Amino acid sequence: MKLKNSTSKIRDLSIEIDKLRMPHHVAIIMDGNGRWGVNKGLTRSHGHNEGVSVLKNIIKFSKKLGIKILTIYAFSTENWIRPHEEVSFLLNLFKKVLDDEIIELNKELIKIKFIGDLSPFSEDLRKKFTEAENITKNNDEFTLNVCANYGGRQELVKVAKELAMRSISGEIKPDQINEEMFESHLYTGDLQDPDLLIRTSGEKRISNFLLWQLAYSEIYVTDVLWPEFNENEFLKAIIDYQSRSRRFGGIKSISNQSLTSSMSFG
Ligand code: IPE
Ligand code: IPE
Ligand code: MG
């Protein structure tokens, strides 16, 4: 009964979507797992597990909607300060999800990339990251960027260091450094910046996510905790996004590109 209701709601909202103005790239701060677990009288870990199920649905749904890139914040450079048990639970969850899901992701023609400073992770986990990237590297339907030990400040410092090294070696002159060159050193490389940033759980902050790339993204914050986020909530975010006037510093609204000829709601 519950499923039937939520399916009919999805159909209703999907009518309001402008298929020609879909965001190309959506970034998500999946927040509120711990609170969800505790609110339910369970543990924070239950919230993280539930969060993974939601993520699986949202990946599939994004692809179906014609979105091309999804960038998710899975573990920040600051999350290491959490209790040891929670950090190790999250690291094991990474492993488990990769073991369980990589074949399915590949079947769905999804390219997976890990973004962040991966060096502090165990060799075993890093091997799994590389394997997943290699298995899916030729998929071009949809890109899933998983931000792991990611921090916007760390990323900007990384770029500064790399450019300094190139200058010292004489490969480039400091004068030649411009936004384009800087951008090419980001983890996201030549990917288009996110059009839409969604943050769940009501916190109105960036928490060190994609500091450069979010310069002109539209921000949508919902009070819904990540384990309760679903297709319907995602459609609400997109409808809200489509109501925005994106001016990029100018005075005229610049419409979003149309990319969704393959869109269907089955
Ligand atoms: C987001 O949920 C997941 C990670 C940061 C890994 P939280 O774990 O931050 O959940 P809350 O915000 O404490 O409820
Ligand atoms: C941001 O959430 C990081 C991830 C979702 C991975 P946090 O829960 O770590 O952020 P704060 O502490 O509320 O700013
Ligand atoms: Mg949080």
Image: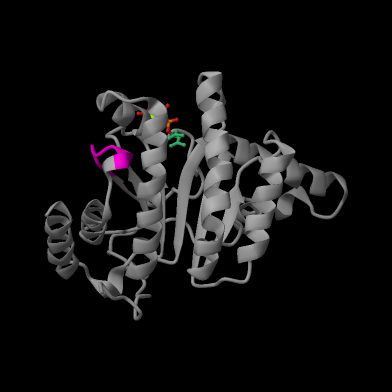
Q: Please say whether residue 225 is one of the residues in the magenta stretch.
A: yes
Along the line of sight, the residue nearer the viewer: 76 or 48: 48
The image quarter in which residue 58 lies: bottom left
Q: Is residue 34 above or below residue 62?
A: above
Along the line of sight, the residue nearer the viewer: 114 or 96: 96
Q: How many numbered tags mark residues here?
A: 0
**In this view, which residue lies farthest toward the right?**
169
- Position in image of residue 177 (x %, y %): 69, 52
Which colour scheme appears in the figure?
A: one colour
In the rendered image, the vertical position of residue 167 relative to residue 34, given as above or below: below
Q: Looking at the picture, does residue 161 appear above or below residue 5?
A: above
Residue 13 locus on image (x, y percent) = 15, 62
Look at the picture and state if 49 lies above or below 193. Answer: above
Q: Residue at x 31, y 40 (%)?
A: 227
Classify residue 44 by image quadrant.
top left
Q: In percent of the image, x 13 and y 63: which residue is there?
A: 8
Identify the magenta region.
221-227
- Asked whether residue 12 appears in the rendered view, the answer is yes
**Image quadrant, ligand 1:** top left
